[in-house]
Image (cartoon, rainbow, N blue to C red):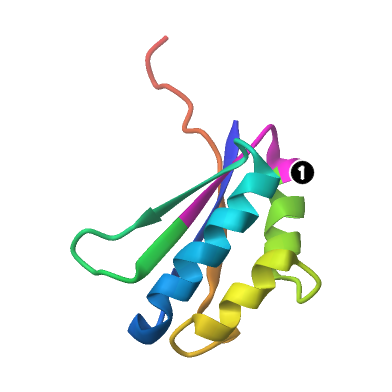
Amino acid sequence: MYICFAEYKIQPDYREDYLLEVDKLRLQEAELVHVYEGTDQPSLFVEVWSCRDEEHALRVKEERLSERSPWFALSSWIAGGPAKLHVWTFKPVASSKQ
């Protein structure tokens, strides 16, 4: 399994609006995405998207960064705007134990 990981900081004045909107968006994605807020840095959020393989993860990343994505609306609340939305793809680490 791969993951697509998005990270950004929401402007504090928009935190409640963000939380309401992200709840709606998560309902559309079922179990594909989990959203977390930093405990040390309030309003710092990460999204962890579960993907079956690298190709799927890259499609999720492309869609998440696209202006046509319903998730793009959240970018207006990001401190620094869409340029401060950081998205990466991660793969599993192979075990060194044989």
Residue closest to the eye, 2 or 11:
11
Q: Is residue 68 left or right of residue 40?
A: right
Residue closest to the eye, 27 or 32:
27
The stretch of residues the image draws in magenta is: 47-56
Q: Is residue 27 magenta?
A: no
Amino acid identity at mark 1 = Glu
Quadrant for residue 44, please give it: bottom left
Q: Is residue 48 above or below residue 13?
A: above
Q: Is residue 7 visible?
A: no
Q: Is residue 27 visible?
A: yes
The location of residue 73, given as percent across then percent down, is 65, 76
Q: Is residue 48 magenta?
A: yes
Image point (77%, 43%), residue name = 55
Q: Is residue 1 above or below residue 37?
A: above
Q: Residues within 10 Å of mark 1 (few under 14, many from 20)?
A: few
Query: In the image as oriented, which residue stretches furthest toward the top?
Result: 98
Quadrant for residue 15, please give it: bottom left
The location of residue 91, given as percent across then percent down, is 55, 40
Residue closest to the eye, 73 or 40:
73
The location of residue 88, given as percent across then percent down, is 55, 59
Query: In the image as oriented, which residue stretches furthest toward the right?
Result: 68
The location of residue 98, given as percent across then percent down, is 42, 9
- Quadrant assignment for the N terminus: top right
Q: Is residue 96 left or right of residue 62?
A: left
Image point (37%, 86%), residue name = 13
Q: Is residue 21 left or right of residue 46?
A: right
Numbered disc total:
1
Image point (62%, 40%), residue name = 32
Q: Secondary structure at mark 1?
A: helix
Query: In the image as oriented, which residue stretches furthest toward the bottom?
Result: 80
The residue pinned by badge 1 equals 55
